[in-house]
Image (tube, grey):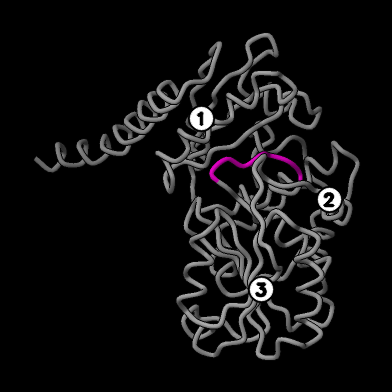
């Protein structure tokens, strides 16, 4: 469990709510299960904390949750039929987040639910394949929905063989796991943030209503490209009451925003930079200095052990 002072948690979480999330959450495939033991203690609590603050429920989050990014990406036809490995590879490489349904029978009831979910999330590209070669290439069984994301080169699987897996659960599964180069933190993206393999998080805490916000986001996204696979870039809207805990965790006041805050998940190592304006260079410098600091911290025990041996 995350400590109460952690930015992605807030107060003690009721066991009843924990069980509710586990019962109602999507059943993911083997890829997610391999990390379940490591992430179970952290993945559900941030979302539940925000649910408590917003007085919502997991089901309402799925219905009301917006996109995890300001940008949009779509396809002319949803889902796109992927008849070969080449088609599937190109499809996955064409967007930050894509979802593919692997079905042995493309007209099955499971595939119909998948198509229905695809229509509910227009900004995420959906593909569908019933090719045995494609299924084998990606190591999935028939009736599996897989989300591929570029930010951490990861994937999440949802088993469609369960009788109660429908369009609503597919929608919730996508909303919970759609991480992008810049992910806006909200009740739906909280679980994806915590399940990411990236342990280093950079937060831009800013007012989305500011007329300067679009330009700030362009610069922040440009910087994110440079640290893809190393740092998870997150946008925190300071206007949301549910984000007040995150702002206070870094000992910031609204008068000091916008600000950058970076922290390392395993040990809560952190740093904060208040700044008048966002620039690609300042974001890069801030990240590089923190990475160097973390590298030095990792090297110190090795140097100490070597000196003791000598």
Q: Element under label 1?
A: strand
Q: Element under label 2?
A: helix
Based on the displayed image, in which of its 4 quarters is residue 230 positioned? top left
Tell me if 59 is positioned left or right of 67 in this view.
right
Tell me if 151 is positioned left or right of 61 in this view.
left
Task: Please state the horizontal and vertical placement of residue 254, each as a whole percent of the image.
Answer: 70, 13
Q: Are marks 2 and 1 in contact (CB under 8 Å)?
A: no
Earlier-in-chain disc, 3 versus 1: 3
Q: Element under label 3?
A: strand
Q: Which residue is mark 3?
A: 145
Residue in the image at 66% along x and 70% along y: 28
Q: Which residues are magenta?
A: 181-187
Marks 3/2: CA–CA distance: 20 Å
Q: Which residue is mark 2?
A: 61
Task: Please state the horizontal and vertical placement of residue 224, each as a whole percent of the image.
Answer: 47, 37
Marks 2/1: CA–CA distance: 27 Å
């Amino acid at each position: 469990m995350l400590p109460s002072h952690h930015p992605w948690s807030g107060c003690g979480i009721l066991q009843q709510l924990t069980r509710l999330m586990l019962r109602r959450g999507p059943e993911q495939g083997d890829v997610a299960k391999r990390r379940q033991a490591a992430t179970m203690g952290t993945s559900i609590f941030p979302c539940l904390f925000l649910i408590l603050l917003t007085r919502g429920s997991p089901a309402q989050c799925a219905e009301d949750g917006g996109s995890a990014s300001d940008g949009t990406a779509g396809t002319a036809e949803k889902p796109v039929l992927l008849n070969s490995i080449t088609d599937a590879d190109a499809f996955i490489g064409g967007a930050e987040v894509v979802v593919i349904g692997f079905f042995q029978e493309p007209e099955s009831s499971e595939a119909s639910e998948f198509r229905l979910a695809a229509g509910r999330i227009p900004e995420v590209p959906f593909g569908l394949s019933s090719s045995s070669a494609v299924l084998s290439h990606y190591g999935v069984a028939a009736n599996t929905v897989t989300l591929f994301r570029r930010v951490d080169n990861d994937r999440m699987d949802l088993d469609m063989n369960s009788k109660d897996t429908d369009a609503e659960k597919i929608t919730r599964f996508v909303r919970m796991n759609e991480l992008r180069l810049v992910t806006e933190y909200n009740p739906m993206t909280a679980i994806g943030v915590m399940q990411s393999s990236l342990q280093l998080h950079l937060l831009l805490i800013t007012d989305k209503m500011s007329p300067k916000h679009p330009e700030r986001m362009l610069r922040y996204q440009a910087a994110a490209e440079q640290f893809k696979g190393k740092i998870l870039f997150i946008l925190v809207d300071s206007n949301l009451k549910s984000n007040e805990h995150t702002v206070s965790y870094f000992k910031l006041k609204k008068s000091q925003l916008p600000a950058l805050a970076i922290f390392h998940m395993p040990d809560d190592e952190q740093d904060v930079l208040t700044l008048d304006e966002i620039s690609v260079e300042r974001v890069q410098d801030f990240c590089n200095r923190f990475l160097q600091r973390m590298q030095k911290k990792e090297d110190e025990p090795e140097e100490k052990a070597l000196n003791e041996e000598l």
